[in-house]
Image (tube, rainbow, N blue to C red):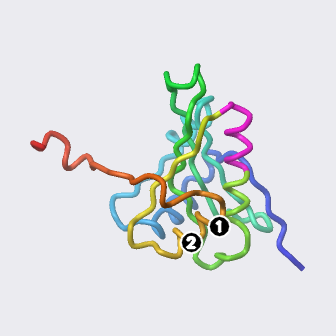
Amino acid sequence: MSPHLTIRIAQSADADILQSLYRQLVDENVRVTAFQIQVLENDPRTRLLVCEVDDRVRGTVLVCLCADAMYAGQPFAVVENLVVDQECRSNGIGLALLREVERFCLSRNCSKMMLLSSATRVDAHRFFEQAGFLGDRKRGFVKYRSQFGEAT
């Protein structure tokens, strides 16, 4: 029997489990607060989603809409921090989260969805391509806060 998946907007009470999931993604300075989850919940241009499997949060994703001047007011979406609990990968959780992100983006008339993935996460790259993201069309660049102000 396949598990029952439920996608919902994250709530303040999810702070600890989100902290745990994010720690599976990165080792550095993760600090999830109930207050920030509430801020995101109240932001109409942002969705912090979680996926529950049999009533336990097992995955999360963040999507933010960005205003754009190019397409007559159509926003574009940035997808960040897609994490599926390492114990539950390859069970449809990530795909279910991305489908919900896509529904949200369609409802807001987005022109596109973009995401970045660490260059070393080859399995994640395959997953994103299987989910319909094109990894060979554009190249992403990142400048982290610790580098702000550095001469270029």
**Residue 12 x/y as whole percent:** 60, 45
Label 2: element kind: helix
Location of residue 119 with respect to 51 vertically, above or below: below
Choose between 93 and 57: the one closer to the eye: 93
- Provide the residue span drawn in magenta: 100-109
- Residue occupying image coordinates x 83% and y 72%: 3
Q: Is residue 89 left or right of residue 141?
A: right
Q: Image point 56% across, 25% down: which residue? A: 71
Marks 2 & 1, CB-CB < 8 Å contact: yes
Q: Position of residue 93 (x, y in %)?
A: 70, 66
- Report the residue marked by disc 1: 130
Residue 49 is labelled as none
- Which residue bears the numbered disc 2? 126
Q: Is residue 19 left or right of residue 3?
A: left
**Where is 35 relative to 42, above or below?**
below
Measuring from the top left, give residue 122's x and y in whole percent. Answer: 47, 75
